[in-house]
Image (tube, rainbow, N blue to C red):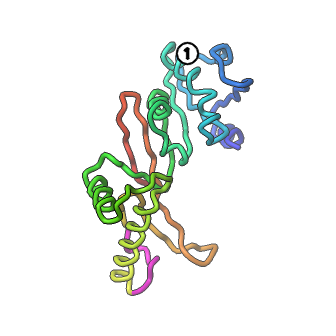
Amino acid sequence: MFKAEFEKNGVESQRIIFKRSLQPIDLTSLNKNTKYLFIPLSSSERELEKCADALIDFRKGSKADVAMLGYPEWVVFNNAMLSKLHSLNTVIYSRFYFNENGDKEKEIANKFEEFYKTPMKKSPPIQAVLGYDCGYYVIKALRGGNGDLFDGRFRYEGMQNVFDFTKSTTTIGAENQALYMIYYRPKGNVDCVIF
């Protein structure tokens, strides 16, 4: 899938094949003084677990600039797997991101729990927050867009979703142009950029 695009743009790529789990010996052909972007072929946590430790060791034992392109499903990882995302300098593309440590986000979570007597369910995306964002967008867009939800004049950056619709030229309806790029930095911080 990526190989043809890389070749078209003059980017060298290499496929690393391994059995059961990636081992340091599987990485011996790699130059330890260059840049690498690892792209797993599966979004499953199990597949990531099979290769993460060897890639982390490679990163620590070389001068290579190592990063990993992750999948939207990974935004819910926590504890040990989250630590591995940071160690691998992972970037994840997603339509949603909820910063549970943010002040506004904590306030919404507390109000939800106070009202419903149960915490919000942590799932990608968090349904309660999706409802909040959608409701806010619909009310503002209808009010400001003369009844047209997708007139393109209203961009909404919500608690976990960004809505920036443009009318489709090929189908009926609209397309959300917004996308999060979530960077899990090696020192433990997370940067989130909205496009």
Residue 142, position in %: x, y? 38, 82
Looking at this view, name the residue that lies furthest to the front.
Answer: 117
User: Residue at image x 42%, y 70%?
Assistant: 134
Q: Nearer the viewer, residue 78 or 150?
A: 78
Residue 140 to residue 43: above or below: below
Q: Main secondary structure of the magenta part?
A: loop
Tell me how many marks there are: 1
- Magenta residues, start to end: 147-155
Tag 1 residue: 32
Q: Nearer the viewer, residue 55 or 145?
A: 55
User: Residue at image x 26%, y 56%?
Assistant: 107
Badge 1 marks a residue whose secondary structure is loop
Q: What residue type is disc 1 on? A: Lys
Q: Nearer the viewer, residue 119 or 63?
A: 119
**Neighbours of disc 1 within 10 Å: few (<14), some (14-19), many (20+):** some
* The image quarter in which residue 114 lies: bottom left
Residue 31, position in %: x, y? 59, 16
